[in-house]
Image (cartoon, rainbow, N blue to C red):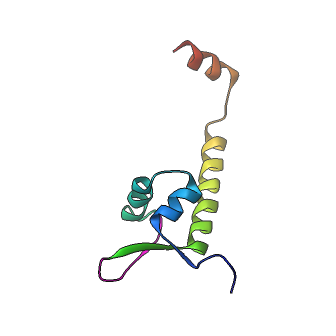
Amino acid sequence: MSGTPRFLTLADVAEVLNTSSAQVYALVRRGELPAIKIGGRGQWRVEASVLESFIEQMYAQTKAFVDDHPFVEADAGRASQE
């Protein structure tokens, strides 16, 4: 078995994504990041492979957004004037 745990806490996921635990919790509660609830206290866990898939999905969504909204120099000038 490798040194990487199979399941990560929301705090672990937040560290990987460099965001807050609250943001990760929101992703889980909205169903954007699949997770399981375990134990009597219902602690959330995200499978490491699911997190990697989520990250790849976010890269694909970001690429689609960039492709649909190309950066144009005129846009940059307008943004700096605002």
Residue plotted at (62% across, 67% down): 52
Q: Where does the magenta region start and end?
A: 33-41
Residue in front for this viewpoint, 71 or 37: 37
Towards the viewer: 31 or 44: 44
Q: Is residue 77 magenta?
A: no
Farthest residue toward the left? Answer: 40
* Above or below 81: residue 53: below
The x and y percentages for residue 62 are 61, 48
Give residue 1's quadrant in the image: bottom right
Q: Which residue is at a point 52% across and 64% down the rendered structure image?
A: 12
Q: Give the residue at x 36% y 63%.
A: 29
Q: Position of residue 18 (x, y in %)?
A: 56, 51
Asked if residue 42 lies left or right of residue 16, the reply is: left
Q: Residue 27: x percent and y percent?
A: 43, 59
Q: Nearer the viewer, residue 80 or 20?
A: 20
Extreme-front residue of the structure: 3
x and y percentages locating residue 45 in the rendered image:
45, 74
Residue 61 shown left or right of residue 82 in the figure:
right
Majority secondary structure of magenta residues: loop
Q: Residue at x 46, y 52 (%)?
A: 20
Is 2 rendered above or below residue 29?
A: below
Q: Does the segment drawn in magenta span residue 35?
A: yes
Q: Is residue 26 above or below residue 64?
A: below
